[in-house]
Image (cartoon, rainbow, N blue to C red):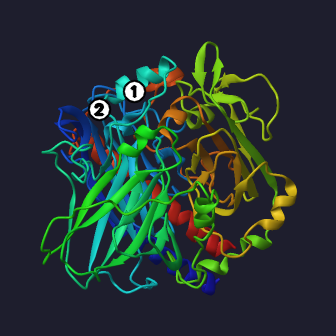
Amino acid sequence: MAAAAMAAAVVLAAVVAAAAAQAEVRWEVSYLTLEPLGQAQKVIAINNQFPGPLLNVTTNQNVRVNVQNNLDEPLLITWDGIQMRMNSWQDGVSGTNCPIPPGWNWTYQFQLKDQIGSFFYFPSLGLQRAAGGYGPITINNRATVPVPFGQPDGDITLFIGDWYTNSHIELRNMLDDGKDLGVPDAILINGRAPYRYDTTLVPDGLQYETVGVEPGKTYRFRVHNVGISTSLNFRIQNHKMLLVETEGTYTNQQNYTNLDIHVGQSYSFLVTMDQNASTDYYIVASPRFISNPQWSQVTGVAILQYSNSKGKASGPLPDAPNDYYDKYYSINQAKSIRMNTSAGAARPNPQGSFHYGSINITQTFVLKNEAPLRINGKQRRTINRISYSPPETPLRLADLHNLTGVYTTDFPAMPSNIPARVASSVLNASYKGFLEIIFQNNDTDIQTYHLDGYSFFVVGMDYGEWTPDRRNEYSRWDAISRCTTQVFPGGWTAVLISLDNVGIWNLRAEKLDNWYRGQEVYVKVADPLGYNITEMIMPDNVLYCGILKERQTPQVHESNSKSSAQAEAGWSNRLLASVMLVVAAVIFS
C-alpha cells in the first residue's frame, strides 16, 4: 500500500503540474471590411485580425478560449486536428455543440493531450470559413522531448486557399439553388492577393504577402490549405523544402521542390536561405486536378525577400507538376511521406514504438462517395448514399438526455444500392477496437476527408476499386499518422485507427461545398462504462438548443462576469475530481 500511495503521489503531482500549465485567450469574432482583391467585402476576423491570431501552446497544457460572437449568425469554432481526449463536448461542430448565438459568449476548455505540431482553427458552420475566421495553432514539444532537427531561426505561417468575392451567404445560396461555385476569383496567401507576376492577370495596386528572411538562415514554414475546394501545389522558387512534420507527426526528412497540399491539410518545412539575393523569389500556390482552363489564370503568389535583395521578382513562375504523362505523380508523392519512426513527439518514446501493423482489425467501414445526386429535388453529396442532415439538437446532447428520434444508428458500414436519402444517421464503432476505413472515391474530383478526435495511419492509396486483397499492399511500419487525407478520383485510400477516444466524432469532407451538401457522418465511440464515466463530464457552461432549448437560461456574457468565474471554478472542480479518480485507481489497483 505504501508503494501504491507513493505512486499515487507521483500521479497527483504530475496531474497538478499539468493543470498549472494553462493557456487562456479571449477572442472577439466579428466582421471586418477589407479589400483582399481590390473591392470591399466583409471577412470574418478574430480580434480584428485576418487571418486570426496564433494559438501558441505546449503539449499537455490546459487551454481556455473565451469566444465572443459578434457576427449576425450562430458560430462554432472547431480545432482541426486537435484530439479532444474524451471530450467531444469541446469539438465545435454541430453534432456535439449547440452554436454560440449572435451576441453571446462561450468558453472552450480542453487539454492538449499527447500532441505536437501544426494545426489550425476555423468556424465550422454554414461555409463561414469561406469568409475567413481561421488561424494557426502551434503545439510545441515539452522541454524534455527533443525535436528531431535544429532550432530554426524563425517560424513562418502561410495560409493558402481559394477565395471568392461573393460572401459566404451568397455562396450558400448558390449551393442551395443547385449551382456549383465555379472558378474562384483568386488564390490568397495569408489573406492577401497575388503578387503581380503577370500584368494581364493580376490588377495593379493589390496588397500581396512578403516574407522577409535573412541570408544563410533556416526557417520553419507551416503551410495550411484553408480554402473551399481547391487542391494546391505549393513551391518556393529555387529553394528546397525539407519536410519535417505534418499534422502532429514528425516525418522522414526529405527535400521537395513542390508538394500538393489538399484542402484541410497542413505541413511543416525547413527552408534554408541559400540562394543569392540578386532578386526576390516567388512563393506559389497553384490549382491542381482541374480541367477548366480558366483555373490556370488563378494562382496565389507571395514574395520571399532576402534582407539584401537587389531587385523584384520577375519572369515566369516556377513550373507546376504536369500529370499528363504521369497520373501517378501526385499519388507517389503522397506515398513518399512517411513517419520518422525513431523520433519522439509528445513523448520521448519513438513514434514507431506503436506497432499498428501487428494489430488485428476489429471493424471495417468502406465509405464510398459518388458524383452529386438529386435527392428530394436538391443537389446533395453522399457517403454510402446517405446525405447527412444535422438535427437541431446535437447528437451528444441528445444522448446525455436520453432523447430518442434525434438520430439513427443505421448508417451502412458498406456501400450498397439503397435509394439515396437525407438522414441524421451515425456509424457505431467499438471503444478500444482497431478500425479500418476505406475511402472509395467514385467521382471525377479529388476528395479530402478529416476525422475529429483522432489521428489515423494512412496505410494505402491507389486508383481503382478497393478489394480486401489490397491489404497486402498496406504500409505496416512507417505510414504517416495524420488527421486529413486525400482520395484521388476513381481511387481509394485506406486508414487504420486505434479507437481510444470516447465520444461522437465528425468524419467529413474538408471541401466546404461537399461538406455543406451532406458529405459527412458522425462516428460514435460509446463509453463502455456509461456516458460521463470514462469521458469528461458535460461542461457547466453547456449551451442548449433544439428539443432542449427550454433548458437554456439567460447568461451574462462579459468575460469578467460572475458566470465566467463560476465556469472556471466548475472546470477546476472537474479537474480535481479527475485527479482524485486517478489517485484512487492507483491506490486500489
Residue in view at x 18 percent, y 33 percent: 39
Q: In 3D space, how far apart are the residues under numbered discs 1 and 2 (Cα atoms)?
A: 10 Å
In which quadrant is the N terminus drawn? bottom right
Q: Position of residue 457 (x, y in %)?
A: 65, 64
SS at circle 1: helix
Residue 455 seen anywhere in this rendered image of the structure: no
* Residue underneath mark 1: 171
Examine the image and state in which quarter residue 421 appears.
Answer: top right
Residue type marked 2: Thr
Identify which residue is drawn at 30% across, 43% down: 67
Q: Secondary structure at mark 2?
A: loop
Rate crowding at label 1 as few (under 14), some (14 to 19) or many (20 or more) other CA atoms within 10 Å. Answer: many
Q: Find out whether the residues at labels 1 and 2 contact each other: C-beta distance under 8 Å.
A: no
Q: Residue at x 60, y 25 (%)?
A: 380
For label 2, the crowd category at 10 Å Cα-Cα, with few meaning under 14, some 14 to 19 and many 20 or more, is many
Instruction: Report which residue position mark 2 lands on.
Output: 165
Q: Is residue 147 visible?
A: yes
- In the image, is residue 313 above or below residue 30? below
Q: Nearer the viewer, mark 1 or mark 2?
A: 2
| 346 or 218, nearer to the observer | 218
What percent of the width, then of the height, locates residue 470? 82, 60
Dot 1 amino acid type: Leu
Q: Position of residue 387 (x, y in %)?
A: 64, 28
Q: Is residue 398 left or right of residue 529?
A: left
